[in-house]
Amino acid sequence: KHGVLTRKSHADMDGKRTPRGRRGWKKFYAVLKGMILYLQKDEYKPDADISEVDLKNAVRIHHALATRATDYSKKANVLKLKTSDWRVYLLQAPSEEEMMSWIFRINLV
Ligand code: I3P
């Protein structure tokens, strides 16, 4: 699955609140492949190598949990992704349908 997702980092590894200055929203081209959610700067190109920056932004979603971000009301279609190492991301999808599809696909892994 791929598509545009806008990310906000809410908590870092071990659940510590992401400090100010790193809490902004950033738009990515997301690609879910195997157990990894790649958050890429540019659109997915099947044959291109993954850049170092894109690898750094990749999220391991094994044992992660995606839910609708019911406690976040500033933006619509936002899902909350909690990883197994206690990171928390907010991810905004372009539509309700896309958000539900990402939640379903992430939790299926
Ligand atoms: C953050 C940025 C985010 C904002 C966040 C700020 O500043 O303005 O958009 O989240 O508020 O800290 P910075 O880019 O300097 O990290 P919202 O869009 O959800 O308001 P927060 O600290 O209350 O999460």
Image: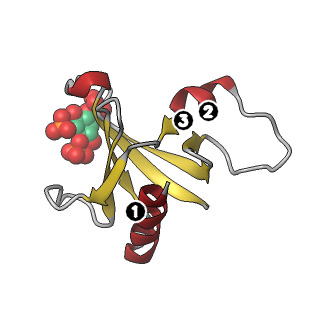
The reply to whether discs 3 and 2 touch (Cβ–Cβ < 8 Å) is yes
Q: Which mark is residue 54?
A: 2
| Pick the front one: 62 or 41 | 62
Give amino acid for label 2: Asp
Q: Which residue is mark 3?
A: 58
- As measured in the structure, the alpha-carbon distance from the residue carrying label 3 to the one carrying label 2 is 6 Å
Give amino acid for label 1: Ile
What residue is drawn where x is 20% and y is 24%? 16
Dot 1: few (<14), some (14–19), or many (≥20) neighbours within 10 Å?
A: some
Q: Earlier in the sequence, mark 1 or mark 2?
A: 2
15 left or right of 1 in image: left
Extreme residue in the bottom direction? 97
What residue is drawn where x is 13% and y is 56%? 71
Task: Say if residue 90 shows up in the picture.
Answer: yes
Observer-side mark, 1 or 2, equals: 1
Q: Is mark 1 within 8 Å of ligand 1?
A: no
Observer-side mark, 3 or 2, equals: 3
Q: Which mark is residue 103?
A: 1
Q: Earlier in the sequence, mark 3 or mark 1?
A: 3
Q: Is residue 13 above or below residue 24?
A: above
Q: Is residue 34 above or below residue 50?
A: below
- As measured in the structure, the alpha-carbon distance from the residue carrying label 1 to the one carrying label 2 is 21 Å
Question: Which element is circle 1 on?
Answer: helix
Dot 2: few (<14), some (14–19), or many (≥20) neighbours within 10 Å?
A: some
